[in-house]
Image (cartoon, rainbow, N blue to C red):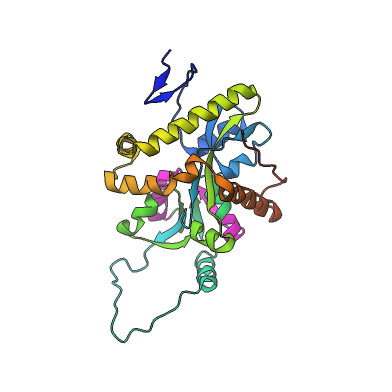
């Protein structure tokens, strides 16, 4: 049995790594199948009886996050400016209402009902018509007319403009304006029936692996390119930096507050059926 992996001391434990999309991991966590798993914070609301959050491994959008896009209405149109242009002051309330109006009666392609992006869109929009589509096929669903708009949770957040789409709303930006907190998207959970000493070991191993990745970004980006769906190294690095950062190393007070605010707001609005006691491995 190897005791180290990529510079991380595994403390004698053996790990069987499964690479699966987030909706699949959410569903497996609901069935209690995995000892440790990445999970959507939304899905955590339904597994909090079986799992606790590790204090590391967060994916948070601090002023940015999942975006709702649609096909550009005039893809060849160019914005024109002149010296006579009138400076318009951005009004968040007006922008939010314009986005809600644009999405009225739209069918929106979403990557899964348990994703945090889906819950954030519910909090922003209320009830809406949707279809569930694998996260990497949402652009296609819009192009083929299956959906009028799509909720993007992957690197398409950086590339949608290059492929004929336009943003309607950035949910992380909206949440930051509303709460002054980052938008909690994903985390790592561990089963609570594992002995406490083992839980602490596992938490330490995951923390060490994150520290290693943050300290060796070039190596981490190189490893990630195999899963980047055609993105180059520069864009891959940018996307990773958006969601793998100091929040990933430790939630901190603002990260923990963000999770509690997110889930409490969802409960207050009726999107989660019971209040959630957020529990971390300490």
Q: Quadrant of the N terminus?
A: top left
Q: Position of residue 227 (x, y in %)?
A: 35, 37
Q: Position of residue 73 (x, y in %)?
A: 37, 67
Q: Position of residue 282 (x, y in %)?
A: 62, 34
133 inside magenta stretch: yes
Q: Quadrant of residue 76?
A: bottom left
Observer-nearest of 209 and 90:
209
Observer-nearest of 103 and 159:
159
Residue 101 vs 39, above or below: the answer is below
Determine if residue 232 is in view: no
User: Residue at horizontal 72%, vertical 46%?
Assistant: 275
The number of numbered badges drawn on the structure is 0
Residue 273 vs 19, above or below: the answer is below
User: Residue at horizontal 58%, vertical 30%?
Assistant: 190
Observer-nearest of 236 and 72:
236
| Farthest-out residue, bottom | 84
Range of the magenta residues?
121-145
Q: Quadrant of residue 251?
A: top right
């Amino acid at each position: 049995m190897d005791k180290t992996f990529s510079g991380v001391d595994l403390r004698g434990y053996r790990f069987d790594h499964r690479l699966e999309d987030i909706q699949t991991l959410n569903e497996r966590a609901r069935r209690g199948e995995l000892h440790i798993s990445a999970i959507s914070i939304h899905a955590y609301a339904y597994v909090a009886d079986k799992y606790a959050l590790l204090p590391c491994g967060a994916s948070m959008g601090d002023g940015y996050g999942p975006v709702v896009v649609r096909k550009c209405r005039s893809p060849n149109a160019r914005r024109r400016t002149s010296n006579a242009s009138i400076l318009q002051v951005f009004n968040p309330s007006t922008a939010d209402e314009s986005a809600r109006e644009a999405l009225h009666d739209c069918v929106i392609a979403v990557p899964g009902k348990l994703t945090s992006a889906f819950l954030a869109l519910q909090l922003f929009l209320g009830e809406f018509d949707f279809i569930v589509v694998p996260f990497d096929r949402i652009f296609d669903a819009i192009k083929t007319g299956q959906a009028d708009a799509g909720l993007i949770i992957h690197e398409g957040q950086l590339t949608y403009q290059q492929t004929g789409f336009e943003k309607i709303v950035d949910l992380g930006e909206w949440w930051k304006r509303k709460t002054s907190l980052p938008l909690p998207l994903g985390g790592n959970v561990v089963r609570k029936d594992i002995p406490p000493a083992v839980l602490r070991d596992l938490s330490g191993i995951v923390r060490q692996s994150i520290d290693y990745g943050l300290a060796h970004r070039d190596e981490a980006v190189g490893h990630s390119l195999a899963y980047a769906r055609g993105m180059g190294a520069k864009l891959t690095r940018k996307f990773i930096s958006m969601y793998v950062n100091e929040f990933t190393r430790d939630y901190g007070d603002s990260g923990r507050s963000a999770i509690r605010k997110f889930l409490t707001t969802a409960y207050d609005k009726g999107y989660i059926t019971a209040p959630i006691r957020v529990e971390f491995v300490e």
